[in-house]
Image: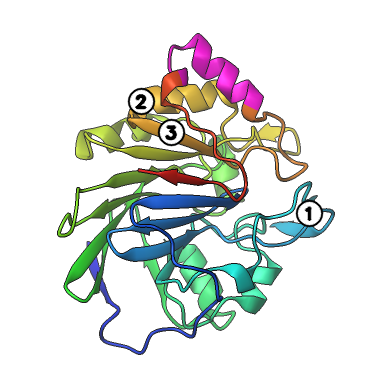
Amino acid sequence: MDTVLDLDDSPPPRSTGTGSPLPEDSLVFVGNATVLLRLGGFTVLTDPTFVHRHEKVSIGYGMHTTRLTDPAMDVADLPPLDLVLLSHLHGDHFDQVAERDLDHDLPVVTTEQAAAGLASRGFTRTVGTGTWDRVLVRRGGRTLSITATPARHGPGVTDLVLPDVNGSVLETDGLDGPVHRVWVSGDTLVHDDLAEIPRRHPVLDLGLVHLGGTRVLGLLVTMDAEQGVEAVRTVDPRAVVPVHYDDYDVFTSGLDDFLAAAATAGLRDRVHPVPRGGAYRL
């Protein structure tokens, strides 16, 4: 199913921050899974979490996790945004600072479950998607397509208690430059449905791969290093920027683990770690 999000049809959201615009075809790593993407004339913020070191966020059912790092920027430092891309509604992906300080009229593309949750918190332009649904974001004759891809936050019956998750493929229209296709894994484990992503999107320029080996009550609920390598082999992006690996105390598998596993698998040349506050050009 296609949904059109026409940014020309409504007033732009109030400026979220006063930061400088990003160069075209680039990203800035803010921290955890929070990334600023500039693609095809659009500026997208992924999974916004802005709490600081030692602050806690909710991960549901009365449980919390503590941040171990500071984000590279605060909400006030962000450039003007076109939309938020949210993989799921957990506190380490959409925290209390994002809920308070982001413009509530800013479009948020996310799961149907998270869209309903954010709407109940006063966000007015949530767009909920199921797997393989597509959102066409339009402004000024340009289009950015966002396709929801399979993601599974936990094993077996944990699907009943963990939130729904989307991965995403973002694709530019190529009007003013090359077409770019970016896969954002979302918080997922390796599962059979990931193999459908390269069948439908055989050319992926970049993968933002959520790692960390997150464990909740002893259960692995995000990819560790070995699963991350398997996901890269399966989905096959040309380049990989690892994210979501050491910012919270529920993580058990850090960046060095993934780099070592990628080297063993002969994939190290694809992996481009970006420091917090650093940039990567597609």
State whether residue 171 is above or below residue 43.
above
Between disc 3 and disc 2, the foreground one is 3
Report which quarter residue 8 is drawn in.
bottom left
Q: Which mark is residue 64?
A: 1
State whether residue 282 is above or below residue 93.
above
State the separation of the CA atoms marked 3 and 2. Answer: 13 Å
Span shown in magenta: 256-268
> Is there a contact, CB below 8 Å, between mark 3 and mark 2?
no
Looking at the picture, how far across and down is residue 259, in whole percent?
57, 22
Q: Quadrant of the C terminus?
A: top left
The residue at the point 60 percent across, 56 percent down is 93
Q: Amino acid at mark 2?
A: Thr
Magenta stretch: helix, strand or loop mostly: helix
Report how many numbered discs are placed on residues in the image: 3
The colour mode here is rainbow
The residue at the point 21 percent across, 39 percent down is 200
> In the current view of this chain or complex, which residue is farthest to the right?
54
Looking at the picture, how far across and down is residue 182, in whole percent?
34, 45
SS label for mark 3 = strand
State the separation of the CA atoms marked 1 and 2. Answer: 32 Å
State whether residue 95 is above or below residue 26.
below
Q: Amino acid at mark 1?
A: His
**Residue 107 belongs to the span the image colors magenta:** no
Q: Which mark is residue 234?
A: 2
Q: Which residue is mark 3?
A: 240
SS label for mark 2 = helix
**Residue 267 belongs to the span the image colors magenta:** yes
Looking at the picture, how far across and down is residue 89, in whole percent?
57, 60
Q: Mark 1 vs mark 2: which is more N-terminal?
A: 1
Between disc 1 and disc 3, the foreground one is 3
SS label for mark 1 = strand
